Image: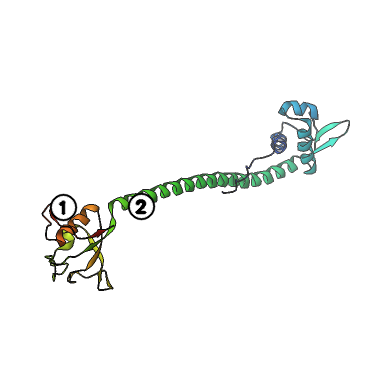
Amino acid sequence: MHEEQPQVHLARYITIAVDIATRIIRGEYRIGQKIFGRSTLAGKYNVSPETIRRALTLLQERGIVDVMPGVGVVVKSDRAAREYLADYNQKKVLLDIQERLTELLKEREKLNSEIDKLTNQLLDYTFKMAGRLQKLDEITVPDGSPLLGKSLAEADFRARTGATVLSIYRNGHEILSPEAKTSLHAGDVLIVVGTPESARMVAQLVNGNDNGNDSELGRPEVNV
């Protein structure tokens, strides 16, 4: 499980401090002018007096206002207000980038989860279909087979059955991926891969009954 990214947002007291500094730059509050008291500002911005106190403390620390007991809040410097807003804008850009990055990471995590889910479904379905459509069979070439002495190419094995010979067991030895020129002997055990229908056609072919009925084949031994 991925760790959830923290939500990025600006504290309310910061946005209030920015608003007051902006008003000072616009000339709504002039240098030396007394602006509203804490209670009035709390009502104006619909926040608690503590939030206003933090905003004014921030402005006072930056030299923008003076908070004087018994007098109130007095505008001190519009230059300091400009410098504060410049710093704020730089930080705001970084915060905006961080917030957008957080959103994109969450979206990527969601997409990765969907991709993993669909990939697993695809693999599961593919394996199930492969299991249904393709399987291994062992088919023994009997004595008297019309294929004895013929090569796989001469028997037109692939074209007539649709099956692929993966190997041939002969006298305790295994011939892996036999070539088309490999001839067939009595007692050879053919390891073939294909559909159930392909296995049936191989059995018919090695018995010389590839055009006949299963019941007439005298099928060789077939081990699944």
In the visual, does 211 lie left or right of 95? left
Crowd tier of the residue under label 2, counting other residues whose Cα lies within 10 Å: few below 14, some 14–19, many 20 or above: few
Quarter of the image where the C terminus is located: bottom left
Say few, some or many: other residues with alpha carbon within 10 Å of mark 1 (under 14 / 14 to 19 / 20 or more): some
Indicate whether 224 appears above or below 100.
below
Q: Position of residue 48 (x, y in %)?
A: 76, 30
Q: Residue at x 52, y 47 (%)?
A: 109
Q: Nearer the viewer, residue 34 or 96?
A: 96
Badge number at residue 11 = none
Q: Nearer the viewer, residue 17 or 211?
A: 211
Type of residue at label 2? Phe
Please give the name of the residue rendered at 30% of the width and 50% of the height, measured from the top-left corner: 132
The residue that appears at 72% across and 31% down in the rendered structure is 28
Mark 1 vs mark 2: give the one in front. 1
Residue appearing at x 69%, y 37% in the figure: 15
Counting the numbered discs, the total is 2
Q: Secondary structure at mark 2?
A: helix
Q: Nearer the viewer, residue 147 or 132?
A: 147
Give the distance between the C-alpha atoms of the residues marked 1 and 2, in whole angstroms: 30 Å
Q: Secondary structure at mark 1?
A: helix
Amino acid on which the number 1 mark rests in the picture: Asp
Q: Quadrant of residue 145?
A: bottom left
Residue 127 is marked as 2
Residue underneath mark 1? 214
Q: Which one is earlier in the sequence, the residue at label 1 or at label 2?
A: 2
Whether 40 is drawn above or below 90: the answer is above
